[in-house]
Every structure is written in structure tokens, then in C-alpha cells.
Amino acid sequence: MANTIKVTAADRTLYHVAASYLGDATQWWRIAQLNGLTDPDLSAFVTPVTLTLPAKDASQASGVPGVVA
């Protein structure tokens, strides 16, 4: 069974969600990818929306894959 949460605009961004649930804000893209989202901004969510969360994975490198600073 997948771990799910309800989010609203009060959660602000997927950065905040990733920091809270995955322990790493830079892994926001994993939540976005799993839920068909492209934007980390949650301000458009007027009503609660259910998001599926990926499992915590310490082997995931921080940041967005394929992007080099």
C-alpha cells in the first residue's frame, strides 16, 4: 500500500512536503513525478488533494536528475 497524504495551498510547495516526509527538500521532483505534476508550487490547490509519496530512499542523490549546477 502506497503512503498518501492530503495537501492544500497551506503546504506551500512540494519542497516543503519533500522536506517533511522524505527528509530532503531537493527530492520534490520524486513526488511530482509520481503524481503527474511538473510545478512544485501548491498555491493553486484550493481543496485538499491526495498525493502519493515515494518511499524514503537514502541512495537518491540530492537535486533534480540530469541537472548539473
Image: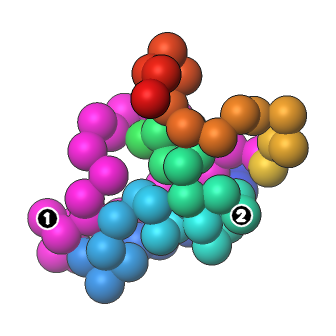
Q: CA gap, disc 2 to disc 1? A: 24 Å
Locate residue 59: give its quadrant.
top right
Q: What is the magenta segment's predominant secondary structure? A: loop
Q: Position of residue 17 (x, y in %)?
A: 51, 66
Q: Is residue 5 above or below residue 33?
A: below
- Residue shown at 63% from the left, 73% from the top: 20
Which mark is first along the chain, 1 or 2? Answer: 2
Give the position of the C terminus as an image quadrant: top left
Q: Nearer the viewer, residue 68 or 36?
A: 68
- Residue shown at 75% from the left, 34% from the top: 60
- Label 1: which residue? 44
Q: Nearer the viewer, residue 39 or 34?
A: 39
Q: Is residue 37 above or below residue 18?
A: above
Q: Is residue 4 above or below residue 16?
A: above
Q: Position of residue 56 (x, y in %)?
A: 79, 49
Q: Position of residue 32 (x, y in %)?
A: 43, 41
Extreme residue toward the right, this view: 58
Query: What's the residue type where badge 1 is placed?
Result: Ala
Q: Nearer the viewer, residue 46 or 22?
A: 22
Query: What's the residue type where badge 2 is placed?
Result: Gly
Q: Position of residue 29 (x, y in %)?
A: 47, 39
- Label 2: which residue? 23
Locate residue 13: give its quadrant.
bottom left
- Residue shown at 62% from the left, 51% from the top: 53
